[in-house]
Image (cartoon, rainbow, N blue to C red):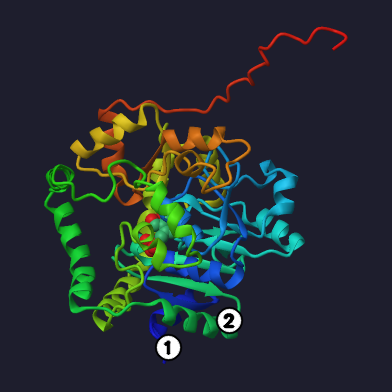
Amino acid sequence: MAYGSRLAATMTRRLGRECVYTPSARLALYLALRRWCRPGARVLMSPVNDDVILFVVLAAGCRPVQAPVSVWDGNIDPAAVPESTWRDVDAVLTTNLYGVPDRVLELRRRCEQLGIPLIEDAAHAIGTHVDGRPIGTFGTAAAFSLSKHVAGMAGGFLAVEDARTRRELELLRDDLLTPRSLRDDLNVTLRPLARSGVRTLHLVRPVWRTMERLGLLERDAFRMDLHARRLTASARSAPSLSAYEPWVRVDLHGFRVRHGALVRGQLTARMAGLDGDLTRRRAGVTLLSGTAWASDALRDRVAHDGPLPLFRVPLLVNGRDALLERMVDHGMVCGYVYDPPLDDYAGAEFVEPSPDPWAARWFASHVLPADPLSARRAIGALTRERAGAARPVRPAPVKDASPPAPLGQ
Ligand SMILES: Cc1ncc(COP(=O)(O)O)c(C=O)c1O
């Protein structure tokens, strides 16, 4: 039996697609990129994304091409992608940021026309549907993350179209897995329990502040250090997961560990609670989307389709950075902030910049990703902090200030 096949079968039943179990969504994305993109391929993606995913794309030997995004949700805006870019990309990678679906019908149409793969990053989007169909079933392949949805410290899937491709990817995966140790497995099994203990005992603030002081957090800012010189050197070995491991493993050091039965058993038990979790998320989304901090776009979507079981609710607030700091004093650590956008973070040596970066910059610097499972607490904290709702206003284009050239030249 293939490694993780029981877990994979559970996901296949949910999704109606063949699934490969992976210890993380990042490994699933790496597999998809290696399978469908040749080295040097240009991959269109949103710059409002986890930096880890940028490094996964680089590790696969691909060139990340940053797309213009919607100012309401940070996902690719297909209509704003220049035709010249469309003609020049070899694959599209979605984000489904915070679980809000990408414009996947339009992206699929484009990809079909161009004959290129559509890879869905559904790490935030288990349970999100478009036109009654689950995200993760529109593209050539889709990656899912269990650490987001069932609060595990491991687990993911790559969903593909047929059993032959699945078997091929299982072999590719097995080559990339590293051996486990009992310590790894205990770490993965016990950490979620410790985390929920901290929350139950209202210790979030002291524990977080202590970790900050002791330098135990892997990032000092929202983005990890780029280490540009080392990154340039690693490019000589791409495609290679090992060469990029220092970047790809951030926040999840066991991302390619072949965990044992203990971890997989715990994930199976947690997956059994997934539907209950999604129901609680919908309830939180209903509450949060009714607040002034939710965008009109989100409110309209909820009114039209009912509440989505979002991973985080993208609230738009003024003074976001200071507010995030103060939220810790209310016992709330809001992660998953992807600021600055990847092109500003990494620069043109490592990514192709977006032709229109304004919306990505605005969204990335104003979004406060609120956990719908703690909706009431988030609303209470934001109310006490008198958080102001932010709305995007695109600045007028700057007119060319240089004096007109004299006639006759
Ligand atoms: C958008 C996105 N995709 C993929 C991943 C990777 O998921 P995992 O931690 O399971 O590798 C993350 C991680 O936070 C993410 O934010």
C-alpha distance separating marks 2 and 1: 14 Å
* Residue 282 can be seen, yes or no: no
The percent coordinates of residue 329 (x first, y second) are 18, 36
First-in-chain label (2 vs 1)? 1
Q: Residue furthest bottom?
A: 1
The percent coordinates of residue 316 (x first, y second) are 43, 34
Quadrant containing the N terminus in the rendered view = bottom left
Identify which residue, 195 or 221, lies in the foreground: 221
Residue drawn at x 70%, y 48% as measured from the top left: 85
Q: Are marks 2 and 1 in contact (CB under 8 Å)?
A: no
What residue is disc 1 on? 2
Which of the 4 image quadrants contains residue 52?
Answer: bottom left
Number of marks drawn: 2
The percent coordinates of residue 343 (x first, y second) are 51, 42
Q: Residue furthest right?
A: 408
Type of amino acid at the residue the image marks with label 2: Thr
Q: Secondary structure at mark 1?
A: loop
Q: Which mark is residue 219?
A: none
Type of amino acid at the residue the image marks with label 1: Ala
What residue is disc 2 on? 165
Quadrant containing the C terminus in the rendered view = top right
Quarter of the rendered structure image containing ligand 1: bottom left
